[in-house]
Image: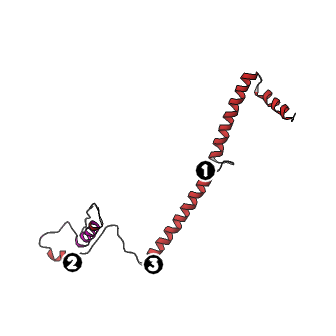
Amino acid sequence: MICFTFSVSIVSFNNLKIYKNFCKNTKLSLNMNNTDSNNQENVVVLIPGKIKLSELEIKDREKKLKNLSEKWKLERIRKEEYEKKTFGFSINSEILNGRLAMFFLVTGLLTEYWTKQNILEQVETIFRTLGLL
C-alpha cells in the first residue's frame, strides 16, 4: 500500500488535534475500493519521515546536537573576535592601514602644493622641527 499525506493549514491548537486524529485514522492507497472495508478497520499510521526513537537514541542525539551547537558558537565567537581585531593581519587592520595611507598621501600632496616642498623635504622639515636631525 502507498500512503499519501495531506497538507493542512494549522491555525489553532484544536486544528492541530484534528489534524493528528486525521493522520492516525486515515490511510489511503492506490488500490482502495469499496470491497476492502476489512482493511480500513485495521488502520496503521504511516507518516513519511517520522521515525520512532528510543529514549537512549533521543538522549544521544540531543547530546550530539548540543556539542554541535557549542562548536558552532565557538566558531562564531572566534570569527567575531577576528573581525573586531584592528592590529595584526586582519581585514580591519588592512582597511585602516589603507585609509591612513590615502589620508597622509593626500595631506603630503596638498602640503607640497602650498609650501612648494616635495614629500622628502617635508619629512626632513618635520624631523628638524622635532629635533631629530
The residue beneath circle 3 is: 56
Q: Which of marks 3 and 1 is nearer the N terminus?
A: 3
Magenta stretch? 15-35
Q: Of discs 2 and 1, which sits in the foreground?
A: 1
What element does badge 2 sit on?
A: loop
Q: Residue 59 appears at what percent x and percent y?
A: 47, 75
What element does badge 1 sit on?
A: helix
In the rendered image, the quadrant that contains the C terminus is top right
Q: Distance between the residues labelled 3 and 2?
A: 30 Å
Verify CB contact (< 8 Å) between mark 2 and mark 1: no
The residue that appears at 51% across and 68% down in the rendered structure is: 66
The residue beneath circle 1 is: 83
Q: Of discs 3 and 1, which sits in the foreground?
A: 1
Q: In this view, does 36 lie to the left or right of 3?
A: left
In the rendered image, the quadrant that contains the N terminus is bottom left
Q: Which amino acid does label 2 sit on?
A: Asn
| Picture colour scheme | secondary structure
Q: Which amino acid does label 3 sit on?
A: Leu
The residue beneath circle 2 is: 42
Please tell me in which quadrant of the rendered image residue 24 appears: bottom left
Q: What residue type is labelled 1?
A: Glu
Instruction: Assess disc 2: are there few (<14), some (14-19) or many (≥20) residues with their C-alpha within 10 Å of its C-alpha.
Output: few
Nearest the eye: 93 or 58: 93
Q: How far apart are marks 2 and 1 (CA)?
A: 61 Å
Q: Is residue 53 above or below residue 30?
A: below
Badge number at residue 50: none
Instruction: Assess disc 3: are there few (<14), some (14-19) or many (≥20) residues with their C-alpha within 10 Å of its C-alpha.
Output: few
Picture mark count:
3
Q: How far apart are marks 3 and 1 (CA)?
A: 41 Å
Instruction: Assess disc 1: are there few (<14), some (14-19) or many (≥20) residues with their C-alpha within 10 Å of its C-alpha.
Output: few
